[in-house]
Amino acid sequence: MIQLEELVKKNLPKEKEGKVASYIPALAEVNPKQLGVALYDLDDGEIGEAGQSEVRFAIESISKVITLMLAIKKMGIQEVFKHVGSRQSGFAFDSILNMEIEKAKYPLNPFINAGAIATTSMVVSKTGEDAFEEILSFARDICNDPNLYLDQIIYHSERRTGNLDRSLAYYMESKNMMLGDVITSLDTYFKQCSMMVTARSLANLGAVLANNGVKPWDGKRIISVEGARCIKSLMMTTGLYNQSGTYSRLIGVPTKSGVGGGLMSAAPHKYGIGIFSPVLDKAGNSVAGLELLKDIVEDLELDIFD
Ligand code: GLN
């Protein structure tokens, strides 16, 4: 039996080794001394929890997985990847430079900000102004979390300070990379990043992906096997920005991070894992969270190549 409480106690002090995100002012207010985990076991449907697993925090970039799932559901994998790439950028998640240097026809992957805004614009192009309402109810469903909500303070903070995201969106608009209206897409993106989740909601989301696209708690399919596989592969190769390669080696389980301090992992056929700890390293990934995840992977002897 894995001792989650022990692992939380062991890894919490690592929060001293980084900083809470401050470029979105509302995130700077979050108490740094927090570490929570939830582990959904596909074998028996039980969820183990420890630390601040019930504390709500902003989902931020992990929402990029949710909009990618929705875009794939609406347009199919082939069509989605005509408008966004699937390779590492080698730059920070909010870089505009890579598209200029590469003279790329589309953003390099759906998990850097440019690619995520383009993906949200695909959902907007299919749904219009109500895209966020659809994203919110989809998020509640796949996270098995009916209380998941939009935090107005974080949303307005994102909107007020989101000029880099605006630059990315208008750059893409000028190159005809945006499928949906640029203003609506940006607003929808700021809102999707400001959805409030818990480690438990993320463990549920991870469990759907680990279970090949079927919600394990009610047996309903959310996305095709191919769709779930494609998302896990992208999480493995680009989910932790330009640290993805390093953590593929150190952790080896498809994982997506967010600057709110969340980590969501899908260990195929075995576990969904949700972690929250708001202190980040330079690339924008949770410091104590990644250490805890490494310990969990070792304790459970998770090997996706088994
Ligand atoms: N809202 C954040 C942004 O647009 C999300 C980034 C992240 O979590 N890495 O910069």
Image (cartoon, rainbow, N blue to C red):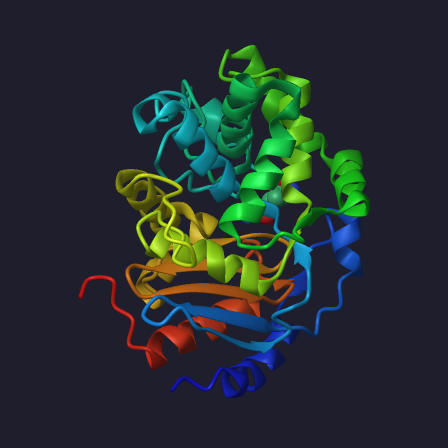
Taking depth in this image into account, of 96 and 161 the one nearest to the observer is: 161
Position of the C terminus by quadrant: bottom left
At 59% from the left edge and 32% from the top edge, which residue is drawn?
Answer: 134
Specify the quadrant of the image occupied by residue 286. Answer: bottom right
Residue 162, given in percent of the width and then of the height, sits at 72, 34
Residue 190, given in percent of the width and then of the height, sits at 68, 36
Taking depth in this image into account, of 72 and 114 the one nearest to the observer is: 72
Task: Judge left or right: residue 215 versus residue 115.
Answer: left
Tally the numbered discs.
Answer: 0
Task: Judge left or right: residue 297 versus residue 203.
Answer: left
Quadrant of ligand 1: it is top right
Residue 89, given in percent of the width and then of the height, sits at 42, 38
Taking depth in this image into account, of 22 and 206 the one nearest to the observer is: 206
Residue 272, given in percent of the width and then of the height, sits at 41, 62
Q: Specify whether residue 205 is in view.
A: yes
At 38% from the left edge and 87% from the top edge, which residue is drawn?
Answer: 1
Q: Specify whether residue 286 is in view.
A: no
Specify the quadrant of the image occupied by residue 104. Answer: top left
At 52% from the left edge and 25% from the top edge, which residue is drawn?
Answer: 123
At 49% from the left edge and 29% from the top edge, which residue is drawn?
Answer: 119
Vertical placement of residue 225 versus 300, above or below: above
Specify the quadrant of the image occupied by residue 12. Answer: bottom right
Vertical placement of residue 225 versus 101, above or below: below
